[in-house]
Amino acid sequence: MSFALITGASRGIGKSIATELASRKFNILLVARDEQMLKEHAFILHSTYGVQVDFFAIDLTEDGAIDKLMRWLDEKLYTVSMLVNNAGYGLSGSMDSYSFLGYKNMMTLNMEVPVALTYRLLPMLLSQKKSFILNVGSSASYQSVPGMNIYAASKSFILSFSRGLCYELRNTAISVSVVSPGATDTDFPTRAQIFGQKAIKMLKATNMSPEAVAKIAVDGMLKGQTEIVAGLLNKVGVLLAWLLPKKVIEKSIAIIYGM
Ligand SMILES: NC(=O)c1ccc[n+]([C@@H]2O[C@H](COP(=O)([O-])OP(=O)(O)OC[C@H]3O[C@@H](n4cnc5c(N)ncnc54)[C@H](OP(=O)(O)O)[C@@H]3O)[C@@H](O)[C@H]2O)c1
């Protein structure tokens, strides 16, 4: 029996991806920090969809977290055939708004953790008949975002990492996808400390539901799509970022984020 392992599965997009996968009869392993929320969601998924569900509560940025997670998988004899690297967060404001350690934690979760999990699970994923890696990027992957600069750079890393890995693994059992949501109605803006009126208005006007994003992500991943941009509006945004001069895009975003 094999499982889909989803990081950041207690809330938001990760929780919705777990639900979407359970509804398609995948067995699920939920990972995030909040044990109570994981327990409740595991119970709901198991009782609603009849799939096997387990959870592991851990702060993935802690020293040794990936080793602990791998030990748990070993002890439980779980086989992972799908890895969803979703856990992540943003920080808004100018560069001096946070301590360097604050940025380091975000960079660890957004970049180092997905690479480490991919690296550690690669042999197991390669040994399956068919397996999947789904990384969660962002519409911010496609251009610099003054006002969420380091977050956007971390998501550009995820986009580039995913595309390169997809190519490297093209003749193997592993299909690699990256989904880029735009504004999605989750706790993301709270943790990112987005309080500016213009930014909040823009997010509210363009928000997709996490359920809609999850469905697009899972559909695209199972079809073997490499790059999945969630929703028409975000697709237009990606096209504009490619067409327009970078300075024009950066200026418009900076105005929204009050930079
Ligand atoms: N919402 C948006 O507008 C948006 C847009 C583009 C991309 N994204 C991306 O989508 C992904 C999911 O974000 P979301 O919008 O669903 O945000 P969210 O509602 O804040 O959910 C984040 C998830 O990550 C988990 N998490 C946070 N820190 C963690 C840590 N140190 N260790 C383990 N788990 C941790 C959280 O659970 P615990 O608190 O229980 O740990 C939660 O399950 C992120 O990668 C984000 O960058 C979001």
Image (spheres, rainbow, N blue to C red):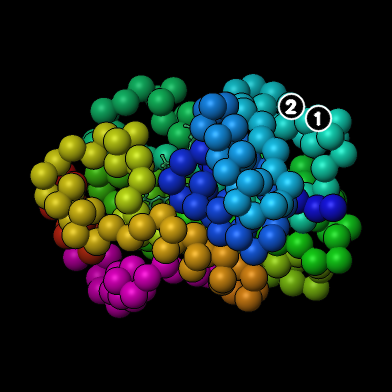
Residue 184: x %, y % from top left = 34, 54
Question: Circle 1 sits in a helix, a strand or a loop, which is it?
Answer: helix
* Residue 256 can be seen in this image: no
Could you tell me the amino acid type at mark 1? Answer: Arg
Query: As drawn, is 169 to the left or to the right of 77?
Result: left
Marks 2 and 1 close (CB-CB < 8 Å): yes
At x 69% / y 52%, what residue is drawn? 50
Element marked by disc 2: helix
Task: Report, in whole angstroms, how far the alpha carbon at label 2 lies from the one at label 1.
Answer: 5 Å
Q: In the rendered image of this protein, does residue 1 appear above or below residue 189?
A: below
Q: Which residue is mark 1?
A: 71
**Is 194 rendered above or below residue 134?**
above
Question: With respect to residue 249, does 193 lie above or below?
Answer: above
Crowd rating for badge 1 (residues with CA inside 10 Å; few <14, some 14–19, many 20+): few
In magenta, the rendered stretch is: 226-248
Figure quadrant, ligand 1? top left
- The image position of residue 234, as x and y in percent, is 33, 68
* Residue placed under numbered mark 2 in the picture: 68
